[in-house]
Amino acid sequence: MKLKKILVWFRNDLRLHDNEILVEAIAKSDAILPVYFFDPRYFTQTSFDTVKTGFNRARFLLESILALRAQFQKLGGDLLLVVGKPEEQITDIVTKFDISEVYHHREVGPEETNISTLVEDVLWKQRINLKHFIGHTLYNKEDLPFPIKDIPDLFAQFKKKTERDAIVKECFESPTEITFIENEDWGVLPELAELGFDASEEISIGEDFHGGEEAGFLHMTNLLTANSEIYMKSNGKAAIDKFSAKLSAWLAIGCLSPRRVYWMIKDAEHQFGGNHNFSRILLGLLFRDYYRFMFKKHGIKFFQESELEMRIESPEKTHDHLMESWKKGETGHKLVDHYMTELVATGFINHAGRLLVATYLVHVLKIHWTNGAAYFEEKLIDYSAASNWGNWANLAGAGLDLKSKMFDIDKQIKALELDLPVVSA
């Protein structure tokens, strides 16, 4: 009898816990082949004179892939590492290992969706099915109180109906036993230099961010413990100044599942009681869902701007000196410069800081929002296509959430100077 072998294509789901494609592949196959492709398209220059993936995120990604590989090795297998475009490499792989089916998590960004289509096309020619899963959201689409086509375009309405009528499912357990396809050469993890980076030119991201599932769990556990203890000692009146969960990097590439974060918070609330910080993390998870579902519903039509695709392919080169001063943190505006310097150094700034620097670029410097979105794509350690481009579009008045179109920069500055609570999930 022919053995059924399934290739598990890892993308932004670098974990064992709550990973449906992994659980399903193990259950439906005799052996699996985990694969990660280092797609050169994610390390190239863009039309905005930025790179798709900056140094800090690239290093975090390599750490996370290495951590996932180590987990597979403990289970008696490995993670096949392949440098090249998936649609150009996968044909030889499925032939060599006699693969019956390929599993992967579908993305919602136009570029990522197109890559899935290209892979599906080449597999179809070999009569091999590419099975799609959706595992990046807190709520499964089938558990929402409305079909994708009827999801409210305003976040406030989406939040109200979802929190009232939808459920968050339990997580899939991490597999404890896996049968791997036998293989002698599992590939080598690329060095940063091989991906085009010069490590000497970048500043360390520091102790806040280390890639991998275990590091994500450690960060989450410490976060919940610290906030619970502070909140209990203050008799429920803990200060939340400058609060930033800093979970988004692990969520962005799937080292942490949003559902696991949700249930860890619910367990902490059951043990210690609820607090405002926990609520802000849950709000951040809901915003992530909102933008992913908006992209799923509308695609490029989410952006209410004519000729957007042409503008992205051929950006205007006006105001270069203003753009450069913004990037380098040399605008002369103390808070803007502080946050932009922090962004370059660490790959992270909190939500309020992002709102401030984006507002300054779009509404003060009068530079088109796509320039800022592309720069954030390079620099953010927690870059996610839907959240990044969706937030920038709404701030600039080019998105669908009409209530997000007006911003008072003076009010933002005052709030930041007073250290009012901020959060970024």
Image (cartoon, rainbow, N blue to C red):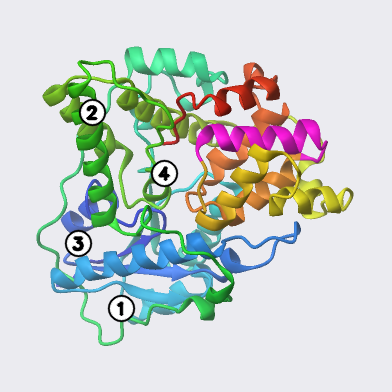
Q: In which quarter of the image is residue 221?
A: top left
* Of labels 3 and 2, the one closer to you: 2
Q: Report the magenta residues as a range.
A: 350-368
Q: Which amino acid does label 3 sit on?
A: Ser
Quick one: quadrant of the C terminus?
A: top left
From the viewer's side, name the closer residue of 368 and 129.
368
**For mark 2, does the 10 Å Cα neighbourhood hold few (<14), some (14 to 19), or many (20 or more) residues?**
some
Q: What residue type is labelled 2?
A: Ile
Number of the label disc, if any, that sits on residue 230: 2
Give the residue at mark 1: 97
From the viewer's side, name the closer residue of 333 and 376.
333
Q: How far apart are marks 3 and 2 (CA)?
A: 48 Å
**For mark 1, does the 10 Å Cα neighbourhood hold few (<14), some (14 to 19), or many (20 or more) residues?**
some
Q: In this rendering, would 188 be left or right of 226? A: right
**For mark 3, does the 10 Å Cα neighbourhood hold few (<14), some (14 to 19), or many (20 or more) residues?**
some
User: x, y (%) of residue 397?
Assistant: 72, 26
**Which of the two labelled residues, at mark 4 and mark 3, occupies the earlier sequence position?**
3
Element on which disc 3 rests? loop
Give the residue at mark 3: 29
User: x, y (%) of residue 383?
Assistant: 52, 49
User: x, y (%) of residue 286?
Assistant: 41, 28
Q: Residue visible at 82% across and 54% down?
A: 314
**Which of the two labelled residues, at mark 2 and mark 4, occupies the earlier sequence position?**
2
* Of labels 1 and 2, the one closer to you: 2
- Would residue 301 be seen by someone viewing this image from the given angle? no
Q: What residue type is labelled 4?
A: Ser
Q: How far apart are marks 1 and 4 (CA)?
A: 36 Å
Number of the label disc, if any, that sits on residue 248: 4
- Residue 236 highlighted magenta (yes or no): no
Q: How far apart are marks 2 and 4 (CA)?
A: 22 Å
